[in-house]
Image: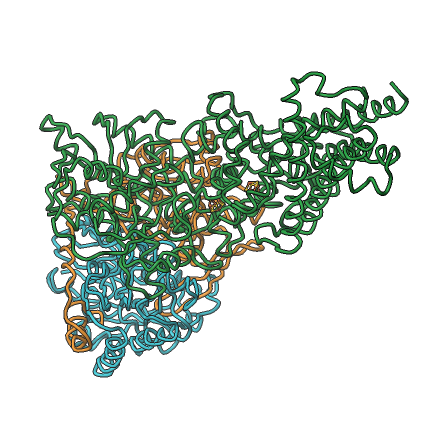
Amino acid sequence: MANVLVFAETRGVALRKVALEATTAARALADATGGGEVHALVAGPPGVGAVAEQLGKHGADVVVVVEHAGLANFNCEVAAASVAARVKGASYRAVLLGFSAQGRDVGPRVAVKLDAPIVADVTAIQAATGDSLIVQHPGYANKVIATLEVKSPLAVLSVRPSAITAQAAERTARVDTMAPAADPAASRVMVKEVVEGGKGKIDLGDAPVIVAGGRGLKAAENFKIVEELAAAFGNAAVGATRAVTDDGWRPHSDQIGQTGRQVSPQLYVAVGISGAIQHLAGMRTSKTIVAINKDKEAPIFKVADYGIVGDVMEVVPALTKAVHEAKAGH
Amino acid sequence: MGTSNLVFAFILTLGAGFFALNVQRLVGYMQIGKSDDRSDHPLVRLKNVLTIGIGQTKIFRDPVAGAMHATIFWGFMVLTAGTVEILIQGVFSKFSYALLLPKLVYQLYAMSQDGFAALVIAAIAFAFYRRLVLHPKRLEGDKLEHTDALIILGMIGGLMVTLLLTNACQYLLDPSAIGPEKFVSRQLAGLIAPLDPAPTRLFTVFWWSHALLILTFLNYLPYSKHLHVATSLINVYLSNTSGPGQKGVMRPMDLEADVDHFGAADVEDLTWKNLLDGYSCTECGRCTAACPANLTGKLLSPRKIVINSRQRLMEKAPVALGDHMEFMHPALVHGEGDDAGATTLTEVLEHRLLDTYITEEELWACTSCRACVQECPVSIDQLDIINEMRRNLVLTESRFPEEIQPAFESLERNGSPWAFNPGDRALWAEGLEINTMAELMERGERPDILFWVGCMGSFDDRAKKIAVAFARILKACNVNFAILGQEEHCHGDPARRMGNEYLYQMLAKDTIGTLDRYEVKTIVTSCPHCFHQMGNEFPQLGGNYEVIHHSTYIERLLQENLVPLQSDHGQRLTVAYHDSCYLGRYNDVYDAPRETLKRSLPVINLVEPPRTKDRGLCCGAGGGRMFMEERVGKRINVERTEELLATGAETIAVACPFCMTMISDGVKAVQSDVPVLDIAEVVAGQLA
Amino acid sequence: MKIAVCIKRTPDSESRFRIAASSTAIDETGLKFDIDDFASYAVEVALQLNEKQGPGEVVVYAVGPDAVQETLRKAMSMGVDRAVQLKTDSVPYDGLAVAKALAAELAGGGYDLVLFGKHAFDTSSGVVGTATAELLGIACVTAATKLDIANGKGTARRELEGAAETVEFSLPAAVTIDEGIARPRYPSLKGIMAAKKKPLETKPAQLGDVRITVKALQLPPDRPAGRIIGEGAAAVPELIRLLQTEAKVL
Ligand code: SF4
Ligand code: SF4
């Protein structure tokens, strides 16, 4: 029987999705080791303790709340120190957190403070016996999956966002409060400003979805169907082939390919792109590729997971409409 | 000897002396360049002088201006003999070639003098007309250039007129002195006679004008682009652009050399031959008029490259050599581009050829198509300067368009300019039952030829089809061939053309190692760049193979009737063939691809675009341009494609995978649906 | 300013990987190794900072077998002043163990800034940088996409999920570098020649306990071959279904 501590990350007073995923993973681990408790620690501005209920619903037995006015912005040093302090005062089998921007910061610091081994970007916890944990961790840009053994009575694991689906495990969490284990004002790193994204243009490098257009669009003004499709996805950036940027239909910064940006989004929609070598070199590693082109011999179909042969002017607006509907139906 | 003889002797000594001094200085300046041995193959060089120089073959590539220039040139050669006679006469009044030559020869000589003088006058008149009225585009430079040209034309005209007038006066004074061979002079005498039947004074005036004009002309040369009068034949002799040696081969480079920089950033880094090129440039602009980059609106002008090197030499050499004769440095000052002329010593030292005169942008615009070199009437090697300067940019300064960095990195890591998995190199051949060298070796067999597929053929979807087509032809002809498969990687030519000699040598040496390990003798490839590199440049690194381009190889197979062709040849097809630079201008392969087309499609109607064969317009991909953006001006491939489509061709044939990409893109860009096929695909399509 | 950059030698990301017979390592035959991409951004950032700040020193460190010397030379050919190899037979998967070796070495170095890549291509963990900073007891910023040093203080920008933050930090500090911050320079031949003469020191690495071991490596299932799902707008509903149920990207 061993307890598991989760660092449940928040932004402001709101819980992040990955915190629930980590809680679910912790629940499973605690159950697997003979029914230990799951404790979740949140650190944030006053009011952040309200997330306890949500954490409880996902399997947290105890929520440790660290509230401080100086924690309006995420403070890595305070978070790490508080997690470490909590672990030192009790007995835990593992510390779990998300492999997110915050988690990347907090995880290794906690590991050092506790001198515990850390595995980052874990996609599955497969077994726990005695001092040994078996976890899965993808390496080599997801081209190789490693099964790792961590031998230690205490380990830190950060879980890959979305790899584990958050699940309900209804409980009413007890709330423990705790003072920050470090002075927020004395931090060596201070957040000066947070700019929420989503409003401005999404950078090609960050966009989870890219809709790119090629010469198959025939004219600059037809590019608007690409923009409309991107807008329908909501989180998409617009890219273009070299032929298109050379023709001045789009700025050069939009170019994807050997001589432009190299991207690998979750979803790449190639509209009227034949798939010349120069373009493929920039997008081949995208996770899912959709191609729409009138020429069924076009090389793009060789790399595309899903291809539609047809006139882009007909298919793309239909797809835009369907994506809107799919999103609305969610 | 009279007083006037003495005075003339004095003036002659002065004039000739000053000219000699300037020649000496110009020769000295040239020597700040690096050494370069051009003492080889005197016979080939002599042949070049006779054809390109004396025969004016390159000049005649522009028939109208060619005829004009050749007339002046040949006139000059002939009249120089007369000039010498006149100069000697100035000192020894009684001298005449008649004293030395048999009568008939002398009469012929005398006739040629008069005849050419008249022809030259006509040519000069046309030249004036051309410059002042017609304004041909390629002669557009800054104003100075025209002034210089007009002065020179005026002087030559003046020389001819005064020569004839002197003769005419002499005839009036002593009819026996001018024989009937000098028919023009005699005619002219008839015009003067009414003015003054015994024109002693006029004779003196014309004679002196002519003699002084000769000396003035001579001494004007070092200050003018017309220095080429004195240097062009020498330059043609020393040039390698039409042989000896293989054309278009980049200079070998010692990377282990203990130098503080590589390539050329300033005139000292060029060879004396490059600098002599500067002296020889006539500013005719033929190179620039043929330059695909220039004619589609890019900044690059090969003429400017040459002129800039000369300008910078004139600025730098006096300082470098401590030539303190401030007065009248041979100037050749006028040039192209912003006048970067230094006014202070510090400025001279701060300047350099790169950046001050020639910008990075110009250098990267070059497609290495060799059209400029091909056109130059005085055998200047513009491309050599560009290549050396690119080497400096990459090897010494690490400055290049950022989009070629991925190409360099991929070449280094993946053995091809694109970031493709090297393990996928032979995927195109899957299921075709093509042997690899390794497989044959294991069985103790050896193929007759190695099919070098090249990176395009291996990775580019369109070019893979060419590789398959060629392999099918080989199979149909029962040729015993093999590929290297995964052991093939880029030989480094793109890196070399982009100035990255280090990367090139690494890849090339490795390739040579592989080829030698398999004791390869004969290589056939469908890529002209591979063909040129492995055949012509590998010997620099100790790789000696017989390398054959697939157009030549297929032509041979067709000639020997080895290719099983379909018997019915369908409908008549109009095909335009686009010449690849590396096949054509680099290797003189013009006929093989055309023959291949004709033999495999007997009902073909082969049409030629206006710019064809050695004047063919580049597709825009060479010189590493394939890996760079083309942001300025019109796209070269579109320009070329439009020209090809204007022939009315129903199919465009190419013999290079890079041309294939560029022309196919061009066809798409102009929204045409004319198919672009490699000659191997044409032949494969006709296989029985 | 004195800057240390800790780099890693990793195989080219375009490679097709195979698992070695031992099943706990990848088969290295035919793989091209080079300085890790993120580490090369860090080197570039260090060089740019050094150029901007005036004379200072940039030193690279790498933990690993002698093969890393080539990688260290590469960094020196870009302009780094000197290099230190912390020698081990192999680099363990345990980032904390590696961090201990680096921290032990960096501790007395007097560095104002220690840079790392955001993570390395092979282990993709992003542990070493932060852990080293924590061991050294200095400030740490992860995944910086912008970095400025002025008046003894640093400012950095980091991308969060769907947001970006600007942070200010005191020196000395460790910063891990994300992509997009700077394009690593291409070493000139001059730089390559110079790098041959620069000092490269080799010391035994004082690795911490290695508590993470590889049990097995596997290749993910092959990407299914591309397929054409239909023609024209009629194929759209099927596409949406596949994106939702199979690819799970919608
Ligand atoms: S090689 Fe071709 S592109 Fe380059 S300068 Fe000469 S003509 Fe222009
Ligand atoms: S380099 Fe040759 S072709 Fe070009 S302007 Fe000079 S003489 Fe004419």
Q: Identify the residue at the far right of this view.
A: B3
Residue drawn at x 70%, y 44% is B148
The green chain is B
Colour in which the image shows chain A: cyan
Residue drawn at x 70%, y 46% is B150
**Quarter of the image where one finds residue B3:** top right
Nearer to the camera, B72 or B454: B72
**Quarter of the image where one finds residue B556:** top left
Q: Position of residue A161 (x, y in %)?
A: 25, 65
Specify whether B90 is left or right of C214. Answer: right
Q: Position of residue C239 (x, y in %)?
A: 17, 73
Residue drawn at x 21%, y 83% is A329
Colour scheme in the image?
by chain
Q: State the quadrant of the N terminus of chain C.
A: top right
Q: Position of residue C11 (x, y in %)?
A: 28, 43
Q: Position of residue B86 (x, y in %)?
A: 75, 26
Colour in which the image shows chain C: orange
Image height check: is A75 above or below A199?
above
Asked if residue A82 can be seen in this view, the reply is: no
Image height check: is B625 above or below B116?
below
Nearer to the camera, B587 or B260: B587
Specify whether C78 is left or right of C8. Answer: right
Image height check: is C64 above or below A93?
above
Asked if residue B624 can be seen in this view, the reply is: yes
Nearer to the camera, C242 or C219: C242
